[in-house]
Structure formats: C-alpha cells, structure tokens
Amino acid sequence: TITKEGYYILRGQLTDGSIIINASDKAKVQLILEGAAINSASNAAIYVRSADKVFLTLADGTKNALTNGGSFPTDDANNVDGAVFSKTDLTINGNGTLTVTSPAGHGIVCKDDLIITGGDITVQSAFHGLDANDSLRMKGGQLTIDSGKDGIHVEDADNSNTGFVYVSGGKIKVESEGDG
C-alpha cells in the first residue's frame, strides 16, 4: 500500500497481490513499471483508492503485465471491477509495453479522466476494455483491445459536460463484442 506522494519503481513478479494507492487527495503518485508482472486473484492488480493524480509510466524497452485472476471483492464500497482500477485521474505514459488481462471484468477502469500519452498497451477483458467516467484523452501510444463488451466505454450519466473521448494521436485497434 502506497500512502505518500512520490515515485515508485516496480520490478519483478507478484503472483497474488495488489498495489494499492491510498494517499491524500493532493498527492501525485508515479508508478514506474520496469519489467513488472502483477497478478491478483481477487482484486485489481493496481487499485487507486485515493490520490490527486496517478501516473503509470512504462519504462523504455520493458514488458509489463497486470492481471486479475477472475474475481473481484464484493464488499468494497468502490465496486472494484477491473484489472486496473482508479478512482482518480490516471495517466499512462512511457515507451514500454503493457498487457492488461481481466477474464471476469473490465481491463482498465478510471472513475475520473483517463489519459494515454505513450506506451504499447494491449487489453484483453471479459467486459469493457477501457472504462472511464469523465473522459478518455489520447495523444500518443498504441492501444490494442479485445473485449467482451465495448472496446472503449466513456460515460458519465450524472454530468453532461463529461463522458467524452478525445483522440489527437496514437493508434487504436479494437475487436469487441459490443461497440468499438
């Protein structure tokens, strides 16, 4: 559990556990994935409960994997349902690769703004590949999504000024059972 603002380098393999960010609502946290493979059998591999902003940086030339093993907690007030789950703004950047696998839920969930500026990101999920509330903003990187529902789903039923997708660069390839 990360409780303070800062830079954190994650390397190696975690076979059954989660990286949980539970910092103040003013904290900026940067997770640098440098050859990390994180699997959680019963939660999100990366779970952002609270912070101001979280940056998920894919270190140059590295391969990284975030996986949920097939179930999610039923007693969490946040209704965690993705291999990556963030209650705050989440930015994915860098020049490494990231594979996100979620056989029983969404791939990447962000209840705020999801921003992608770099990386080669592959998402395989039973439900939505990317699921955001406020917005998805992409200006670089490469997304490959294979999803059981929508490839990219952005919706905020409570606010008509949010719930949008903005793409100004990068590449997107989606295979989905629902909407692209």
Image (cartoon, rainbow, N blue to C red):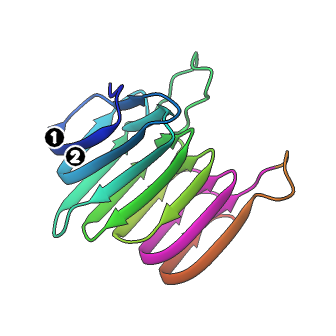
Point 24% across, 55% down: residue: 64
From this viewpoint, which residue is outermost toward the top? 75
Q: Residue 21 occupies which quadrant of the picture?
A: top left
Screen quadrant of the N terminus: top left
Badge 2 element: strand
Screen quadrant of the C terminus: bottom right
Pointer 1 and pointer 2: residues touching (CB < 8 Å)?
A: yes
Residue 180 shows in the view: no
Taking depth in this image into account, of 114 and 84 the one nearest to the observer is 114
Badge 1 element: strand
Point 39% across, 65% down: residue: 122
Query: Which residue is identified by label 1?
Result: 13
Tell me the kind of residue under disc 1. Gln
Query: Residues under labels 1 and 2: Cα distance?
Result: 5 Å
| Label placed on residue 37 | 2
Rendering coords of residue 28 (x, y %)? 41, 43
For residue 119, side relative to residue 153 (left or right): left
The stretch in magenta equals 127-156
For residue 57, side relative to residue 47 (left or right): left
For residue 40, side relative to residue 36 (left or right): right
Query: In the rendered structure, which disc, 1 or 2, sits on the residue that comes first in sequence?
Result: 1
From this viewpoint, which residue is outermost toward the left? 12
Point 31% across, 60% down: residue: 98
